Structure formats: structure tokens, C-alpha cells
Image (cartoon, grey):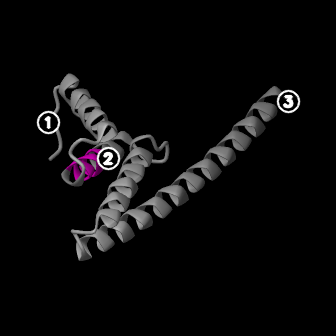
Amino acid sequence: MRAILCFLVLVLLTGSFSQDVKAEKAKLAKLRTAYATSKNAYAKDRSNAKAKNAYAGATLKYANATMYSPALGPKVKYPAALRLYREVLVVDPKNKVAIASRDTIEAIYKSMKREIPK
């Protein structure tokens, strides 16, 4: 009886985790779309300050979601987030969140004595 109860709890928890992963992947897809849209708008008119700010903001949101997503493994999320934070810093070099996040990821790689992704 106890084994059956443990099995049922495990099945329920696994199902819940699966739904959370699906929701997280949907959230990431939505942010990726907003990022791509704002990037394209900025590429069409680099002199447009509003487009530049929208692009930097969308990229930062997507980077943060990528960095902290439980749906992505470390080998995927850290290099992807690092690339996105660097992209923010190209258009907004003084962005404190992007600087701190980039530095954190790079410090993690250094502490593990691993090469920092380009």
C-alpha cells in the first residue's frame, strides 16, 4: 500500500513538473518573439531611440528569463544568456543589470576553470 501511495505521489509530481516546463517554454518562446521583433525594428532604423530602448529592454527580459529558466539546462542557458547580455551592452553599455549578470556568468566560468563562451 505504501509503495502504491509513493508511486502515485511521484506520478502527480512529475505531471506537475511537466506542466511547469511547458509553461516555461511557452514563456521563453513569447519573449524570444518579442526580442526578434524589437531587434528587427531597431535594425531597420538605428537612429530611432524608441526602437533602441525597446530592443534593449526586450533583449534584457529574454536574457533574464533564459538565465533563470528551470526548463533549460546549464549548458544551454548560461552561454545563451551571456550572449544576450552582451547584446544588450552593445546598445546600452551602461546597463547595470546586464553588466552585473554578464560578470556573474563570467565569474562562474572562471571559478570552474572553464573557458568563457564567446
Dominant secondary-structure state across the stretch colored magenta: helix
- Which residue in the protein does label 1 denote? 115
User: What residue is disc 2 on?
Assistant: 81
Viewer-nearest residue: 6 or 76: 76
List the single residue furthest toward the top. Answer: 111
For label 2, count other residues whose C-alpha is less than 10 Å away and answer few (under 14), some (14-19) or many (20+). many
The magenta-colored residue range is 81-89
Residue on which disc 3 sits: 1
Kind of residue at disc 2: Ala
Image coords of residue 32 (percent x, y): 41, 62
Image quadrant occupied by the N terminus: top right
Task: Identify residue type, mark 1.
Answer: Glu
Nearer to the camera, 105 or 93: 93
User: In the picture shown, does residue 73 fall above or below 5?
Assistant: below
How busy is the neighbourhood of tag 1: few (under 14 within 10 Å), some, or many (20 plus)? few
Label 3 neighbourhood size at 10 Å, few (<14), some (14-19), many (20+)?
few
